[in-house]
Image (cartoon, coloured by chain):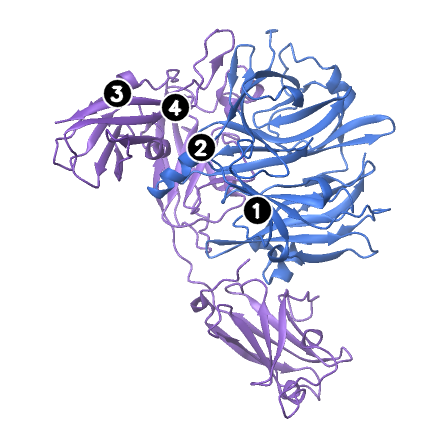
Chain colours: A purple, B blue
């Protein structure tokens, strides 16, 4: 495990409040030092500590520095202090004790440094406060599906933020309200692990599948989440904070109307492909008759040239996730290209190219596969 | 109204290609994230890293069978660990608890968020002495092997910069030489149970990544869906090992491990629906007297004690469950145990739990009910 290396964060207000414990107490000073090494360290010095070095700069106290100094975070000066993990070393050059914390220091936190003599008598205690981190304000940049007409068996929302958000207990900040402004009870599948993207800027919310499926107990008892013809508001609470602790500031509201359930699989035969011209960087355009899953559209459709090389380029999705455009990095050449569609590509209700969300067990043939489907187009 | 109803779980097994596996033990593990953990043989602790899509098998040295496990009770374990890290309790999360079956020592995976970055640590709570000792388990010095769960298709898209896909790991367990990993994706809706043989094989070995078992979750007698498994446990009945899996969308399903073969379709049996507004969190198997039980922690229905004999007898639910009732297995709710968020077995007579009380978390050993 690495200790945070960005030392700029740890600009410090060091050792401003050192106070004596008793008459023989020592002025205890602390300073966060940024040596060329990657690890932020704490320099702890006092006249008493200086005296523990001999003329050659060797540590002469019978006890090791770690037995004499404690760094801690505590509710108050007099509450129980638990030592922070880290390494203490006697530094002969400065005749001080250097503390290397095992974990990086936290912004906006008060740290105590306690010095004892060998008999466990407290000689001095001081404290310092790390600067509050610049808390980045984060806003919601997009919510998918983007349409305001959503099927009543909708399975997912994706919420995109401009920066990383705070994880943990997120479901308290998200709700779906009905037309009367009343929050629908437990609409989401609440997963302790929470479905975040790697950069913590995109959250996936699954609507409780037990409430979507007919015949399942949660739906029987609590009713469906969405009903066709009714109006809803998807609300994200302004009190939810970014990873660095700044609240969103204002509620995010997406108003939508539920429409009849979607039971059809995405069908590649119904896709309309507009081929680009050769020697151009015009986009290859695919239009779908229904909205598809925004995140999967970015990942599961790929274009190959006739040599089977995947093309590099940029994907743009528009028209409420009904239009997929691919802008290549290099000009199109005359000839045949192939579009590969992963069968896991889903529509808004979890029906994928390969398989329906609900599969009839009694039908003999089940469209289940993990394969890829291909579409071809010619560039002229 | 009685509607004929049975639940079934079919499992189609697929072998996924192109995973990398490191079977050579090396020193030092650097976790990007820490998800569920479980103990395997010879003191090996499996730690999942969902961000890296990896599972590490870490040698903990927890191999000496302890004669007697001491009971412990540590109030505000979260605050104590936070202080050792140098932060406040609000800033850390305890992701999972795993108890060594040999020594009874507890391992906690803890993460802390600082400025969008996550730091992860494993803490060990030694129960051998009278006073429990909380210490950092040094991953940097630990000997470990690992296996990667991502496949080539995903890393390809990764280079294009679009890949935000991640699999959350909801539970893992070592059963008869294989590590079973349940998870779900943050993009496609697919249930995924993967079985990886341990010791991990090298990357060239086709079996290295094990089988990825896709689960179709049945409902209503007609349909099957793809609901993910939230937590599971293994138990033996009449010489056969079974998995008892709690699904995200309600039922408890029994699946014989022997049926989980590649390229076969398996029907599991739904043995209970445990009630609505409820999330199963964790479970363990234990023996009391001559009877075997499952102890299951839930978010809103407390801790359930379910006799395994009942599960063996259950042949699947056949009728609709009436409002607010639970159907199938008869079970007991342990009223004294509220707010249990984590649960692991110490031995047949003891269990370790983490209890949430207000904003604080306590770690304690309890007698199995």
Q: Nearer the viewer, mark 2 or mark 3?
A: 3
The residue at the point 60 percent across, 57 percent down is B140
Chain letter of disc 1 in the image: B
> Which residue lies under the disc numbered 3?
A271
Check the picture and name the quadrant holding the N terminus of chain A.
Answer: bottom right
Can residue B75 be seen in the rendering of this structure?
Answer: no
Q: Residues within 10 Å of mark 3 (few under 14, many from 20)?
A: some
The answer to whether dots 1 and 4 both sit on one chain is no
Q: CA distance from mark 4 to mark 3?
A: 15 Å
Element under label 3? Answer: loop
Q: In the rendered structure, find residue A176 and report the number of the disc placed on it.
A: 2
> Residue B103: percent from the left, percent from the top?
78, 47
Q: Residues within 10 Å of mark 1 (few under 14, many from 20)?
A: many
Q: CA distance from mark 1 to mark 2?
A: 31 Å
Quarter of the image for residue B193 reads: top right
Can residue A344 be seen in the rendering of this structure?
Answer: yes
Q: Nearer the viewer, mark 1 or mark 2?
A: 1
- Residue contact between numbered discs 2 and 4, judged by CB atoms under 8 Å: no
Name the foreground residue: A216 vs A334.
Answer: A334
Element under label 1? Answer: loop
Mark 4 vs 3, N-terminal side: 3
Name the foreground residue: A93 vs B114.
Answer: A93
How many numbered tags mark residues here? Answer: 4
Q: Is residue B142 left or right of residue A236?
A: right
> Which residue lies under the disc numbered 1?
B34
Element under label 4? Answer: loop
> Which residue lies under the disc numbered 4?
A343
Name the foreground residue: B151 vs B172.
Answer: B151
Q: Residues within 10 Å of mark 4 (few under 14, many from 20)?
A: many
Image: B12 above or below A363? below
């Amino acid at each position: 495990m690495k200790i945070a290396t960005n030392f700029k964060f740890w600009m410090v207000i060091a050792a401003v409040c050192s106070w004596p414990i008793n008459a023989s107490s020592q002025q205890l000073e602390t300073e966060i030092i940024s040596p060329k090494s990657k690890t932020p360290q704490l320099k702890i010095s006092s006249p008493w500590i200086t005296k523990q070095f001999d003329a050659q700069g060797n540590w002469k106290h019978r006890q090791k520095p770690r037995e004499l100094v404690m760094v801690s975070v505590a509710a108050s000066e007099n509450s129980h202090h638990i030592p922070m993990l880290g390494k203490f070393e006697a530094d002969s050059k400065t005749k001080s004790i250097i503390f290397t914390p095992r974990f990086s220091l936290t912004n906006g936190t008060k740290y105590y440094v306690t010095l004892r003599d060998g008999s466990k008598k407290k000689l001095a205690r001081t404290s310092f406060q790390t600067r509050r981190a610049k808390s980045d304000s984060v806003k919601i940049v997009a919510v998918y599906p983007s349409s305001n007409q959503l099927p009543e068996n909708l399975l997912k929302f994706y919420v995109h933020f401009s920066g990383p958000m705070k994880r943990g207990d997120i479901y308290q900040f998200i709700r779906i309200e009905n037309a009367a402004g009343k929050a629908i009870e437990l609409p989401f599948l609440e997963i302790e692990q929470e479905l975040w993207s790697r950069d913590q800027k995109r959250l996936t919310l699954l609507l409780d599948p037990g409430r979507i499926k007919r015949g399942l107990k949660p739906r029987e008892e609590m009713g469906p989440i969405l009903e066709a013809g009714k109006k809803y508001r998807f609300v994200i609470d302004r009190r939810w904070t970014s990873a660095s602790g700044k609240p969103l500031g204002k509620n995010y509201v997406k108003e939508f109307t539920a429409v009849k359930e979607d039971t059809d699989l995405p069908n590649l035969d119904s896709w309309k492909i507009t081929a680009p011209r050769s020697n151009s960087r015009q986009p290859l355009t695919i239009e779908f008759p229904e909205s598809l899953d925004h995140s999967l559209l970015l990942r599961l459709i790929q274009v190959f040239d006739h040599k089977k090389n995947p093309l590099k380029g940029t994907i743009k999705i528009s028209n409420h996730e009904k239009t997929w455009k691919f802008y290549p990095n290099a000009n199109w050449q005359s000839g045949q290209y192939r579009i590969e569609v992963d069968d896991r590509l889903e529509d808004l209700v979890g029906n994928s190219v390969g398989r329906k969300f609900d599969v009839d067990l009694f039908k003999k043939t089940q469209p289940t596969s993990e394969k890829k489907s291909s579409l071809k187009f010619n560039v002229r | 109204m009685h509607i004929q109803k049975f639940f079934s779980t079919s499992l189609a097994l697929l072998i996924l290609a192109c995973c990398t596996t490191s079977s050579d033990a090396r020193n030092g593990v650097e976790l990007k994230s820490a998800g569920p953990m479980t103990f395997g043989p010879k003191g090996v602790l499996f730690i999942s890293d969902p961000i890296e899509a990896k599972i590490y098998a870490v040698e903990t040295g927890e191999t000496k069978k302890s004669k007697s496990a001491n009971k412990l009770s540590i109030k505000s374990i979260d605050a104590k660990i936070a202080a050792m890290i140098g932060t406040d309790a609000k800033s850390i999360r305890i992701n999972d608890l795993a108890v060594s079956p040999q020594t009874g020592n507890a391992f906690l995976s803890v993460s802390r968020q600082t400025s969008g970055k996550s730091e992860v640590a494993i803490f060990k709570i030694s129960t051998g002495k009278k006073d429990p000792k909380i210490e950092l388990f040094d991953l940097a010095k630990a000997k470990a092997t690992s296996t990667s769960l991502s496949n080539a298709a995903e890393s390809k898209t990764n280079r294009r910069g679009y890949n935000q896909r991640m699999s959350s790991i909801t539970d893992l367990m070592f059963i008869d030489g294989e590590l079973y990993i349940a998870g779900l994706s943050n993009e496609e809706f697919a249930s995924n149970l993967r079985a990886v043989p341990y010791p991990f094989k090298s990357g060239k070995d086709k079996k290295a990544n094990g089988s990825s078992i896709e689960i179709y979750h049945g409902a209503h007698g007609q349909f099957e869906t793809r609901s993910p498994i939230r937590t599971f446990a293994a138990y033996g009945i009449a010489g056969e090992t079974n998995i008892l899996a709690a699904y995200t969308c309600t039922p408890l399903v029994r699946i014989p491990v022997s049926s989980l073969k590649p390229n076969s379709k398996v029907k599991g049996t739904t043995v209970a629906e445990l009630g609505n507004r409820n999330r199963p969190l964790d479970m363990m198997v234990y023996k009391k007297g001559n009877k075997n039980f499952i102890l299951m922690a839930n978010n809103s229905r407390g801790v359930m004690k379910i006799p395994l004999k009942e599960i063996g007898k259950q042949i699947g639910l056949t009728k609709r469950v009436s409002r607010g009732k639970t159907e199938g297995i008869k079970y007991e709710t342990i009223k004294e145990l509220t707010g249990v968020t984590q649960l692991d077995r110490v031995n047949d007579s003891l269990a370790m739990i983490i209890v949430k009380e207000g904003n604080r978390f306590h770690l304690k050993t309890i007698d199995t009910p």
